[in-house]
Amino acid sequence: MDLLEQYDDFLVDEYQNFPQSNYVNILLLRKTESETIFRTENEGGLTKEFIRIGDSEETTQRVVMTKRKQVAVERRTGRELLRKHDQLFEGDKGICALNRNTPCGECIDCMLYGFAAGGGGAQKARVITNDAYSLLAAKKITDKRTFNALYDDGTMRDPETGEASASLGEVEYIKPETHFIDVQTLKDVTKEEFIYVLGNILRSFRYGAISSKIGKMKNYLLGIYFSDCELASNLELTQEMSQEIDSTEFPLATAEIKELAKEKMKELTSDVFGRVQMMSDDELTELLAETQNIYQSSEQVKDLLETATEKY
């Protein structure tokens, strides 16, 4: 990870309790590669919000990929790796696990993504996420499909009783080749933690509901921006991009969207009241190659995880 040495001013040598104003902003383009469903609990349809584009008084409805839908998947991807290399530790109430109130408070997952244990103990997340919005209006990127559940004989009637199945309904879904723009921010992280989070993003492929059957998504790394403050929000970046593509028909050309996202991010960072240092395209390519090389070696991955843990 020699490449990251020139960005040492924005990374920390080891974890400290006190914030130090070091940020790594990861610009991502997320593209669905199959039918996908993003919805919150107790809601039948997709999660949507109305937003304004530019100075227009009118609002347009966009599909929302909530921050929880993003980070939950990537966090589980990382925990699989920690479990494989025996880096999930035993806490006071048992082995470290999600949604069971048994965080160990010592592993990379707990220390990066945060935890709150009932009865005492907490760690604020240093992976900062926001809701991501579809680049095109909801009406352009969604559709509905009727589903049913057949019996063993391939019909909708119980072969023994002859009664009709009640498993007939309609589901709203996001079409393949739908794009979401996302900026994921890391605060006060070490080099090892940065590579760990980057690996979680690039190794995650299934998002949303019914992800064992649908929900395939590809994450494109478009840029890394080191700074001493947070940069543009997902909403702001989506609004800037949508002014130029809102009239474009679905599906969008991924290559063109990549360039537009980098262009708009550059414009927005120029207005920041703080230091910003952007990784060049060549450096980004080198970073991806180094990260891939690490994750292709079990020994290097174990060394990465152990080194990160030793710095707590």
Image (tube, rainbow, N blue to C red):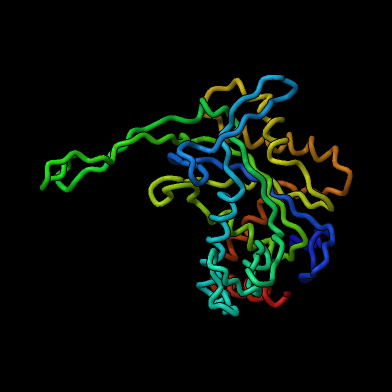
Which image quadrant is residue 246 in?
A: top right
Residue 296 visible to the viewer? no
Residue 51 drawn above or below residue 124 = above
Residue 64 visible to the viewer? yes
Q: Assign the N terminus to one quadrant of the image.
A: bottom right
Image location of residue 86, percent across then percent down = 54, 77
Image location of residue 53, percent across then percent down = 69, 25
Q: Assign the C terminus to one quadrant of the image.
A: bottom right
Residue 173 drawn above or below residue 74 = above
Looking at the image, which is closer to me, 135 or 280? 135
Name which residue lies at 63% across and 57% down.
198
Name which residue lies at 67% across and 55% down.
286
Count of marks overlaid on the render: 0
Which image quadrant is residue 253 in?
A: top right
Q: Is residue 272 left or right of residue 198?
A: right
Name which residue lies at 72% across and 62% down.
124
Which image quadrant is residue 143 in?
A: top left
Looking at the image, which is closer to me, 312 or 256? 312
Q: Is residue 170 left or right of residue 164?
A: right
Q: Is residue 78 left or right of residue 149?
A: right
Looking at the image, which is closer to me, 78 or 6? 78
Image location of residue 75, percent across then percent down = 57, 60
Q: Residue furthest right?
A: 273
Name which residue lies at 19% across and 38% down.
164
Looking at the image, which is closer to me, 20 or 30? 20
Residue 208 drawn above or below residue 61 = below
Image location of residue 306, percent across then percent down = 64, 76
